[in-house]
Amino acid sequence: DAGVIQSPRHEVTEMGQEVTLRCKPISGHDYLFWYRQTMMRGLELLIYFNNNVPIDDSGMPEDRFSAKMPNASFSTLKIQPSEPRDSAVYFCASSPGGSNTEAFFGQGTRLTVV
Amino acid sequence: GQSLEQPSEVTAVEGAIVQINCTYQTSGFYGLSWYQQHDGGAPTFLSYNALDGLEETGRFSSFLSRSDSYGYLLLQELQMKDSASYFCAVPGYGGATNKLIFGTGTLLAVQP
């Protein structure tokens, strides 16, 4: 398996634009996580899914953020409208679940909102 | 409240031993994990302690004490390539199965 794949790797957008981040988890993994990383706030869990179902979205900062997982091999994180304070690195990670709690991270999407 | 606290920075020299501590506060707890992240890279898994005691993996060891809500990562024979950020993490945070929350992170600088 190629690991967790995220796209794009870098995104620069203007304030007010819609941004969509994409993630392909490792095949067979039951859990998918979206994290945001900034210097000030560290690694924050935004939302996670179990078997494509959102379990906990309490970390989603505002209604401008939404995430979907239409099938086991694809998830999106959307920000609409984007703001400069959304600038961060966004990581997607997947985990097998059960007794195996190891999370495998994608390379991240570096988002800059100007 | 619920939290995982780590020192923000640690500095050590090549060949030395360094210990990175993590204290946690959570209403539900299954175990403690450690991750390494190099600058510009993704976090990668290092170890997981489900039970009290010391787990050794090569130059790295991880310790857990449930009664003290405390764990640490021990890095021996430090190398320059060990310069990175290290995060403790709790899978099952707050008792929620597989909810993975990370600590504040410790930046380790290894000097020649």
Image: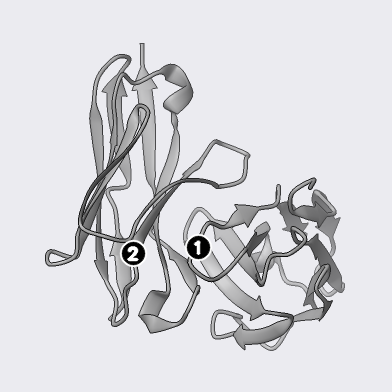
Which chain contains the residue that carries disc 2? Answer: B
Q: Which residue is mark 1?
A: A101
Confirm or deny contact between disc 2 and disc 1 (CB under 8 A).
yes
Q: Residue at x 74, y 81 (%)?
A: A52
Q: Quadrant of residue A22?
A: bottom right
Q: Quadrant of the C terminus of chain A?
A: bottom right
- Left or right of B40, for residue A24: right
Query: Is disc 2 placed on a helix, strand or loop?
Result: loop
The disc numbered 1 marks a residue on which chain? A
Residues beneath discs 2 and 1 located on the same chain? no
Query: Image point 84% across, 69% down: which residue?
Result: A20
Camera-side residue: A17 or A92? A92
* Residue B38 percent coordinates (x, y): 54, 36
Residue at image point 65% right, 79% down: A50
Q: Mark 1 is on which residue type?
A: Thr
Estimate the x, y position of residue A35 in percent, counting from the top left: 60, 65
B49 or A9, nearer to the observer: B49
Which amino acid lies under the numbered mark 2 shown in the image of this protein? Gly
- Find the residue positioned furthest to the top: B112
Pick the residue in front: A46 or B100. B100
Query: In the rendered image, which quarter is residue B62 located in?
Result: top left
Where residue B106 appears, x then y in whole percent?
Answer: 36, 45
Tag 1 secondary structure: loop
In the displayed orientation, state which residue is furthest to the left.
B67
Label 2 belongs to which residue? B31
- Residue at 70% x, 86% y is A53
Q: Is residue A8 left or right of residue B88?
A: right
Q: Is residue B105 above or below residue A94?
A: above
Query: Residue A60: image x %, image y %?
Result: 61, 80
Q: CA separation, marks 2 and 1?
A: 9 Å
Mark carried by residue B43: none
Is A69 displayed left or right of A100 in the figure?
Answer: right
